Image (spheres, rainbow, N blue to C red):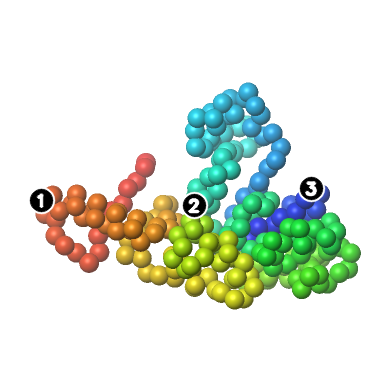
Amino acid sequence: MRAVAFVGYKKSGKTTTVEAVARVLKERGYRVAIAKSMHAEFDRPGSDTWRFSRVADAVLVRASETDALIFRAKDVNALFSMVSADFLLLEGFKSVEHVPRVVCARKPEEVEELGNGLAIAVSGVLASSGLREIAGLPVVDATKEPEKLADIVKKKAFMLPNIDCGLCGFRCSEMAKMIVKGEKTVKDCVVISQKPKVVVKIDGQVLPMKDWVQELVEKTIKGMLSAMKGYREGRRIEVVIRDE
């Protein structure tokens, strides 16, 4: 799964831009997921969901008009792991630094404020001014040229594991900035490029694991199975757990 964040201040055109890009990608046959970071009091203090969120890692809400899944801010990896799509478009999420971003700006100075070395393009309100480039970044009006912005997203979207394993010698945020600059590629991420000895998937999505975690899982499973009648060594052992 590849991802891009669309960051900007209030009334900068984020929603319009995300919607336009998502529509183009869907028309091209890709599966698209959108995650929105909200600052409004959706989960009001004192409400049932607020009380539940104080004691639970996640709260699922079934309402008459919509459904929702409330995550704590620190659980962004858990949120992303539940998504199965070709492209994940993030509206907001300025604190997420392991994916590239499109800056939706109202004025030129916001591009530098929000780019953080991760910007691949500029859009939003500023794009309607007629500017074609700013700070070396293409400026694309998503309301007029959604295909062009979708092309940029398709070409430059990526998502690193965000586990800061250190195997590549950098933090994921540092590696992401180097990928955006063209100094590195996603293949330089050891977790993504290596063929792991142990693969764990949750609903089809690979769960990133450091080498020592893979070794722990391997030895634990083999240790338990070796005590069972009928067990034999094999080049490939599959364990499937279904919560149904």
Amino acid under disc 3 = Lys
Q: Amino acid at mark 2?
A: Ser
Q: Position of residue 191 (x, y in %)?
A: 44, 65
Left or right side of 107 for 4: left
State which tag comes first along the sequence, 1 or 2. Answer: 2
Q: Position of residue 112 (x, y in %)?
A: 77, 62
Quarter-wise, where is residue 67 in the image? top right
> Would you say 63 lies left or right of 145 here?
left
Q: Check disc 2: other Cα within 10 Å, few if <14, some if 14-19, many if 20+.
A: some
Residue occupying the point 67% across, 53% down: 94
> Relative to residue 187, is residue 225 depicted above or below?
above
The disc labelled 1 sits on which kind of residue? Lys
Please state which of residues 168 and 224 is positioned toward the viewer in this rendering. 168
* Label of residue 81 in the image: 2
For mark 3, what is the residue? 10
Corner quadrant of residue 126: bottom right
- Residue 229 is marked as 1
Q: Nearer the viewer, residue 76 or 83?
A: 76
